[in-house]
């Protein structure tokens, strides 16, 4: 008899709820509302793309949802955890257990190999298994590059290491800030494909980008303006990452 586990659809996870979330930088005349009362619901398992002009609050939104920044006001719940009013220590635990980050410029440790860059996260967080790291690097197409240092890898390969690193702790939600911003089209598409695959495994994915073409692969597209959600659109049929082009 066939193994029924092979057919099990992964449970969707990584839902997000914001109500009136504010984040202000500076004081007096220099005071700036980076987030100016954001209301937003992201369903578990959704792939959401965030667009908007420079300075509209996209990165701040991502950082607040990821527990990198504390909101000044409003209510915020991510993957079942209420983040408002939390002590910094609790936010560290939340980040460790719930979210994975992918950045535009990869943020790898230059003195560690690809394998070590992923292993160090497994060891620091106590999540995931060191023995699974080679398999993860294989999944992102780096079986033959595991012992290379970041400087010996192309931009796309470095971004794939950073995706393996983000997935090593099995996060509920993957937060990606301009993950293709430093890559050419072909390489960028392989990265998008990996993010889509991570989403198809049930994880929430929230991706900030300036590239409006990427919006076609999202379940929902959010446009930010002046620290607020200006619009929200649902794609009836999200495209395969392979079909995205720019
Ligand atoms: N640490 C900070 N200190 C002061 N101001 C900040 C800080 N971080 C962001 N800002 C300001 O908050 C506003 C929103 O910034 P944010 O980086 O979220 O915008 P963005 O939409 O991601 O922009 P971009 O597309 O250029 O990356 C901007 O005006 C920015 O200058």
Image (cartoon, helix red, strand yellow):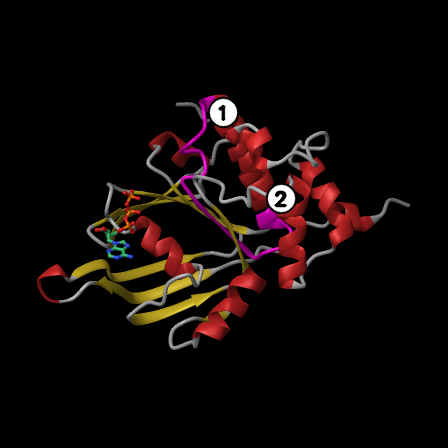
Residue 183 drawn in magenta: yes
Q: Is 226 or 69 nearer to us in this picture?
A: 69
Q: Which residue is mark 2?
A: 112
Q: Which residues are magenta?
A: 164-185
| Distance between the alpha carbons at the discs numbered 1 and 2 | 34 Å
Residue shown at 24%/48% (left/top)? 56
Give the mark nearer the N terminus: 1 vs 2.
2
Res. 176 visible in picture? yes
Q: Which residue is mark 1?
A: 243
Q: Is 170 or 40 nearer to us in this picture?
A: 170
Could you tell me residue 46's position as x and y percent? 49, 49
Could you tell me residue 136's position as x and y percent? 69, 43
Could you tell me residue 223's position as x and y percent? 29, 45
User: Relative to 62, is 238 above or below?
Assistant: above
Based on the displayed image, in which of its 4 quarters is residue 172 positioned?
A: bottom right
Residue 196 drawn in magenta: no
Callout 2: SS: loop
Mark in front: 1 vs 2: 2
Residue shown at 44%/73% (left/top)? 88
Question: Could you tell whether 29 is left or right of 104 in the image?
Answer: left
């Amino acid at each position: 008899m066939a193994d029924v586990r092979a057919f099990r659809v992964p449970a969707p996870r990584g839902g997000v709820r914001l109500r009136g979330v504010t984040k202000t930088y500076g004081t007096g005349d220099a005071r700036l509302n980076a987030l100016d009362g954001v209301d937003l619901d992201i369903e578990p398992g959704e792939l959401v793309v965030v667009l908007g002009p420079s300075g509209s609050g996209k990165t701040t939104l991502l950082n607040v949802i990821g527990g990198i920044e504390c909101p000044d006001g409003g209510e915020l719940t991510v993957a079942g955890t209420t983040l408002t009013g939390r002590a910094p220590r609790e936010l560290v635990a939340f980040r460790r257990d719930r979210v994975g980050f992918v950045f535009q410029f990869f943020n790898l440790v230059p003195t560690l190999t690809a394998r070590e860059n992923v292993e160090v996260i497994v060891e620091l967080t106590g999540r995931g298994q060191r023995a699974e790291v080679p398999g993860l690097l294989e999944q992102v197409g780096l079986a033959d590059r595991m012992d290379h240092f970041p400087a010996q890898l192309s931009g796309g390969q470095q971004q794939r290491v950073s995706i393996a690193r983000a997935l090593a702790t099995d996060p509920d939600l993957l937060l990606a800030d301009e993950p293709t911003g430093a890559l050419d089209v072909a390489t960028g598409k392989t990265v998008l494909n990996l993010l889509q695959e991570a989403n198809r495994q049930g994880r929430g994915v929230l991706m900030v980008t300036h590239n409006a073409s990427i919006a076609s692969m999202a379940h929902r597209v959010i446009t930010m303006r002046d620290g607020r959600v200006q619009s929200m659109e649902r794609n009836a049929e999200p495209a395969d990452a392979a079909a995205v082009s720019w």
